[in-house]
Image: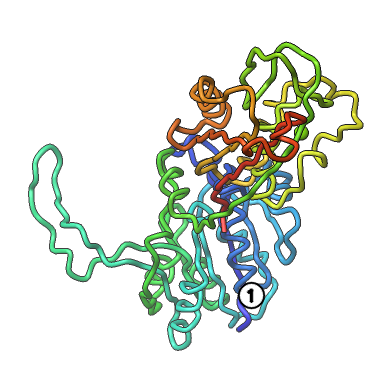
């Protein structure tokens, strides 16, 4: 079905700590979630209404998407909606879905319900029945309000484009509607209620972001890493970010911390983001003698940039010497600090190969690692 979208992102969002529509949620700006949802559902065009000085910001936040245009809004939300409606280039009978950018978790099911409910009506809105008991009062309760027949209005709200334009034209100057349905109701229109979605919560206060993050669809990913370095003359060895006195050292371009290298590869592997050599080429003199914790920190930063989070890591060091056990807690604590994980989500284990193979002969040390991450789906 042909329909258009208007996403209102012109508010200052002062209660949420300012400019909430541009803040990242699950690795992308809040406004991008609903624009993507509408475009994916087939909306054409999607008009994004932003503050006049934020047009550049919109282009940045929506980079790579096609089928949207940005227009400057007005002082009040209603002015912004009017500006958005004016910019929709479609027939008067085309359904238009007006949506607040501050409700990022828009699913296709709600969009479908609205479009199905619209024929024969002047509008249809997403709403949820009130489930809490309602009280009227100040410091003390005056009365308990009967909640039967009461609904919480959400967005999107759907209307035939021409019908909503006409209702706005008839709206009295100086009065501020709180949603589009109120404008059409006042103009005598029939507006239907369709089942909304609790995930369409409005980001109003800073703490709402944490709740929205928790509601994001996520996928669990696992990555593995493996690394080997050769033993050579030296007095200490770096393993899992801890320097251990030893009668040999591991040879490598950086500090040769095989534990951190394997773990960095496990993280990159879980993200499908290449390997440590892609990010830190051994041919680059910049990494000569480098402390390997910066490689791991880099991988963690790339995970955070994608809105992901680390769940747990598990490293196994494979060598006959040095004895790892006395240093295991220090290694776990160091990794936990780098990764911002609880200690119980960080494991370091060690094993020998029963004197077999290159690790058994003391030619080199091997490390393997597993990392579990969550990424926005
Ligand atoms: Mg290495």
When asked about the image quadrant of residue 37, the answer is: bottom right
Q: In what quadrant of the picture does the N terminus appear?
A: bottom right
The residue identified by callout 1 is 42
Residue depicted at x 52% and y 72%: 108
In the rendered view, does 291 fall on the left or right side of 4? Answer: right
Query: Does residue 142 lie above or below 296 as drawn?
Result: below
Query: Does residue 327 lie above or below 297 as drawn?
Result: above
In the rendered view, does 259 fall on the left or right side of 163? Answer: right
Where is residue 194 shown, x and y percent of the image? 38, 75
Ligand 1 within 8 Å of disc 1? The answer is no
Q: In what quadrant of the picture does the C terminus appear?
A: bottom right
For the image, the number of numbered tags is 1
Where is residue 314 shown, x and y percent of the image? 55, 40
Residue depicted at x 45% and y 78%: 113
Q: 221 or 119: nearer the eye?
A: 221
Quarter of the rendered structure image containing ligand 1: top right
Residue depicted at x 45% and y 65%: 180
Query: Does residue 194 lie above or below 77 as drawn?
Result: below
Can you name the residue that lies furthest to the front here? 355
Where is residue 111 shown, x and y percent of the image? 50, 73
Q: How is the image coloured?
A: rainbow
Query: Does residue 156 lie above or below 2 as drawn?
Result: above
- The local secondary structure at tag 1 comes to loop
When asked about the image quadrant of residue 335, the answer is: top right
Does residue 78 appear in the picture of this structure? no
Where is residue 330 shown, x and y percent of the image? 52, 20
Residue depicted at x 66% and y 35%: 355
Q: 337 or 208: nearer the eye?
A: 337
Say few, some or many: other residues with alpha carbon within 10 Å of mark 1 (under 14 / 14 to 19 / 20 or more).
some
Can you name the residue that lies furthest to the bottom here? 120
Does residue 1 appear in the picture of this structure? yes
């Amino acid at each position: 079905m042909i329909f258009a979208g208007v996403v209102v992102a012109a508010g200052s969002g002062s209660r949420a700590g300012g400019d909430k529509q541009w803040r990242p949620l699950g690795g992308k700006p809040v406004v991008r979630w609903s624009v993507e949802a509408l475009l994916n559902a087939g909306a054409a065009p999607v008009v994004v209404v932003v503050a006049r000085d934020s047009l550049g910001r919109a282009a940045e936040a929506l980079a790579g998407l096609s089928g949207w245009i940005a227009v400057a809004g007005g002082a009040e939300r209603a002015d912004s909606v009017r500006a958005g409606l004016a910019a929709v280039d479609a027939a008067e009978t085309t359904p238009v879905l007006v949506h607040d950018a501050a409700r990022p978790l828009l699913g296709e099911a709600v969009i479908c319900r609205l479009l199905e409910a619209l024929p024969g009506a002047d509008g249809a809105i997403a709403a949820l029945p009130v489930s809490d008991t309602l009280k009227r009062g100040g410091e003390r309760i005056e009365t308990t309000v009967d909640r039967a027949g009461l609904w919480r209005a959400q967005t999107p709200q759907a209307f035939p484009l021409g019908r909503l334009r006409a209702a706005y034209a008839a709206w009295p100057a100086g009065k501020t509607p709180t949603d589009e349905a109120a404008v059409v109701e006042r103009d005598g229109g029939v507006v239907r209620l369709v089942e909304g979605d609790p995930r369409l919560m409005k980001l109003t206060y800073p703490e709402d972001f944490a709740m929205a993050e928790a509601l994001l669809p996520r996928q669990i990913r696992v990555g593995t890493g493996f690394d080997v370095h050769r033993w050579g003359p030296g007095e200490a060895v770096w393993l899992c970010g801890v320097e251990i006195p030893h009668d040999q050292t591991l040879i490598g371009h950086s500090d040769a911390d095989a534990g951190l290298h394997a773990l960095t590869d496990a993280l990159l592997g879980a993200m499908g983001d290449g390997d440590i050599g892609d990010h830190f080429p051994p041919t680059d003199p910049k990494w000569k003698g480098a402390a390997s914790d910066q490689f791991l920190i880099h991988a963690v930063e790339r995970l955070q940039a994608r809105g992901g989070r680390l769940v747990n890591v598990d490293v196994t060091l494979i060598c006959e010497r040095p004895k790892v056990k006395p240093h295991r807690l220090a290694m776990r604590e160091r990794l936990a600090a780098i990764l911002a994980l609880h200690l119980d989500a960080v494991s370091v284990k060690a094993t020998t190969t029963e004197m077999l193979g290159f690790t058994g002969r003391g030619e080199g040390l091997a490390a393997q690692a597993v990392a579990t991450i969550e990424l926005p789906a």
